[in-house]
């Protein structure tokens, strides 16, 4: 880490700003050298812009002072967790400050009696799960990047994962927040209790806002007791329509699955070709299903799910009877990501959502787009809430493929909206989808949202040029 004095490094930041900044933070909290700042300029998308400086915040009070200075000198400030997002939301497109939370990684309080955990934004999702489990609890959001991603990033994107089908997203599992607005004012939103209706719900407003309204510095997380047991099942179907019928029937039962994951036929072919997974030939779709609860009730729950999942298109249905069998069933799903990385390491990954009953129409439409634009598309995702991850297997270094992919994405988003869906389920908007959101949000609502942004961040320094389509100056 560079410990040079600010006068010794060329930077686009005003010298007066830097001098004032060093009265707030110590030298070992700042990076100014371009080569060191470079790695804080990208996330898990292909976007990259090197910030003018990187700051490693250490406390809420320090963040207030930093934001006050950034507001005074109109320096952009972009909050950053571990950079696992896929939409460019943490890329500092206007330079300025990349505000890293890797040092604000403390679990401040665990309150089992009230099922609450208070954390800083730099704590990883896995750390939360591990500490909660020591007391017999868990925090329901569980993105696939849980080992690496931070709770701040989870809150910024409302990232949920497979358990959302039963237990909800961060919005349903966060009681309150402590945050700093764009003009450096501290706010506390929400409650410490599980009920509360005083004032507007600013907590849910900030969650999913991608750091454009306020910088979250603490969160009161609502914990859920761990179930005694889980039961894992795998259902394989001859076609997507049979699988979709099963999804609708499963979700209509009194037993809500702990997880209900979907993989299409192309994904299954890829898994078969690039792993040792044992899958039936010519299968069109697969469901991974888990139920949880009291150990005495799981046999009945599993029977209800199996009955709902059974139709003419069902090829096989397996229920794991041991840990080894659970691992074997999930091995099929886990083999997909390595296979995708091997075939298309720079694939485009979208996460659209449609009503469950419209999943067949979405997959059929995507197949037509795949043929039309000669783009190989593989689909998987969280079937229980219609959240499908659409993967375009392209080479971004091939201009023809990229041009086809852009037209394919344009038509895909139109298809999703036609099916009464939404353009993002948990990956957020960032840079990648900002030019499409006015297709989903009507002009009056868009105007109100821009006005809300203006109230929270009058000078527009918080994560600028994200979430909304750009406007002419």
Image (cartoon, rainbow, N blue to C red):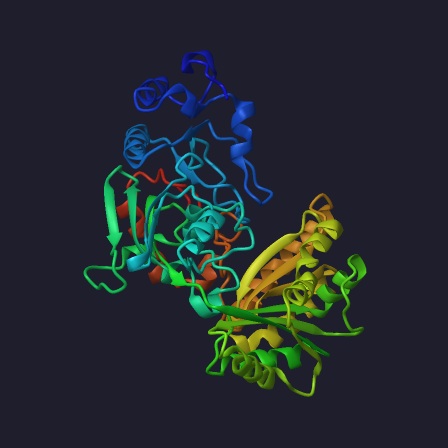
The percent position of residue 468, horizontal first and vertical second, equals: 42, 51
Q: Is residue 200 left or right of residue 55?
A: left
What's the residue at 77%, 67% (across, down)?
278
The percent position of residue 418, horizontal first and vertical second, equals: 53, 72
Q: Is residue 8 left or right of residue 314?
A: left
Q: Is residue 380 left or right of residue 85?
A: right
Q: Is residue 109 above or below residue 278?
A: above
Query: Looking at the image, can residue 470 be seen?
Result: no
Q: Is residue 259 above or below residue 142?
A: below
What's the residue at 24%, 41% (across, down)?
186
Q: Is residue 136 above or below residue 306?
A: above
- 360 or 405, which is in the foreground? 360
- 314 or 264, which is in the foreground? 314
The percent position of residue 46, horizontal first and vertical second, equals: 60, 43
Residue extending farthest top = 8
Q: Quadrant of residue 370?
A: bottom right
The percent position of residue 334, horizontal first and vertical second, equals: 66, 58
What's the residue at 66%, 81% (across, down)?
242
Q: Quadrant of residue 248?
A: bottom right
Q: Quadrant of residue 241?
A: bottom right
Query: Looking at the image, can residue 275 be seen?
Result: yes
The image quadrant where one finds the C terminus is: top left
């Amino acid at each position: 880490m560079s410990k040079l004095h600010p006068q010794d490094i060329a930077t686009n930041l005003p010298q007066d700003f830097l001098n004032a900044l060093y009265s707030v933070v110590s030298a070992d909290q700042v990076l100014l050298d371009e080569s060191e700042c470079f790695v804080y300029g990208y996330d898990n998308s292909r976007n990259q812009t090197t910030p003018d400086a990187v700051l490693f915040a250490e406390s809420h009070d320090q963040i207030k002072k930093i934001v006050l200075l950034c507001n005074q000198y109109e320096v952009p400030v972009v909050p950053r967790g571990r950079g696992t997002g896929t939409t460019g939301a943490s890329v500092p497109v206007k330079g300025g400050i990349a505000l890293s939370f890797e040092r604000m990684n403390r679990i401040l309080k665990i309150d089992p009696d009230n099922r609450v955990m208070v954390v800083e934004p730099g704590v990883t999702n896995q750390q939360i799960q591990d500490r909660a489990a020591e007391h017999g609890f868990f925090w329901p959001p569980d993105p696939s990047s849980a080992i690496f991603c931070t709770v701040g990033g989870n809150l910024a994107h409302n990232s949920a994962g497979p358990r959302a089908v039963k237990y909800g997203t961060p919005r349903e599992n966060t009681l309150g927040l402590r945050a700093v607005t764009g003009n450096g004012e501290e706010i506390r939103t929400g409650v410490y209790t599980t009920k509360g209706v005083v004032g507007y719900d600013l907590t849910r407003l900030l969650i999913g806002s991608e750091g454009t309204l306020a910088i979250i510095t603490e969160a009161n997380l609502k914990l859920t007791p761990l179930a005694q047991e889980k039961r894992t099942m795998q259902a394989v179907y001859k076609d997507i329509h049979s699988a979709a019928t099963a999804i609708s029937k499963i979700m209509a039962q009194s037993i809500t699955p702990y997880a209900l994951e979907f993989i299409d036929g192309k994904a299954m072919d890829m898994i078969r070709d690039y792993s040792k997974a044992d899958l039936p030939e010519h299968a069109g779709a697969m469901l991974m299903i888990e139920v949880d609860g009291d150990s005495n009730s799981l046999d009945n729950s599993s029977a209800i799910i199996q009955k709902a999942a059974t139709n003419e298109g069902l090829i096989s249905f397996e229920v794991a009877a041991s840990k080894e069998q659970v691992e074997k069933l999930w091995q099929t799903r886990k083999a997909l990501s390595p296979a995708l990385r091997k075939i298309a390491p720079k694939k485009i990954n979208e996460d659209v959502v449609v009503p469950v009953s419209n999943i067949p129409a979405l997959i059929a439409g995507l197949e037509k787009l795949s043929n039309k634009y000669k783009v190989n598309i593989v689909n998987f995702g969280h079937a229980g809430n219609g959240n499908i991850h659409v993967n375009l297997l392209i080479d971004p270094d091939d201009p023809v493929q990229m041009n086809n992919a852009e037209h394919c994405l344009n038509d895909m988003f139109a298809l999703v909206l036609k099916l009464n869906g939404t353009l993002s389920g948990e990956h957020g908007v960032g840079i990648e989808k900002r030019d499409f959101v006015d297709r989903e949000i009507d002009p009056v609502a868009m105007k109100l949202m821009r006005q809300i942004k203006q109230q929270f961040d009058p000078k527009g320094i918080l994560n600028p040029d994200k979430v909304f389509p750009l406007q002419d100056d």
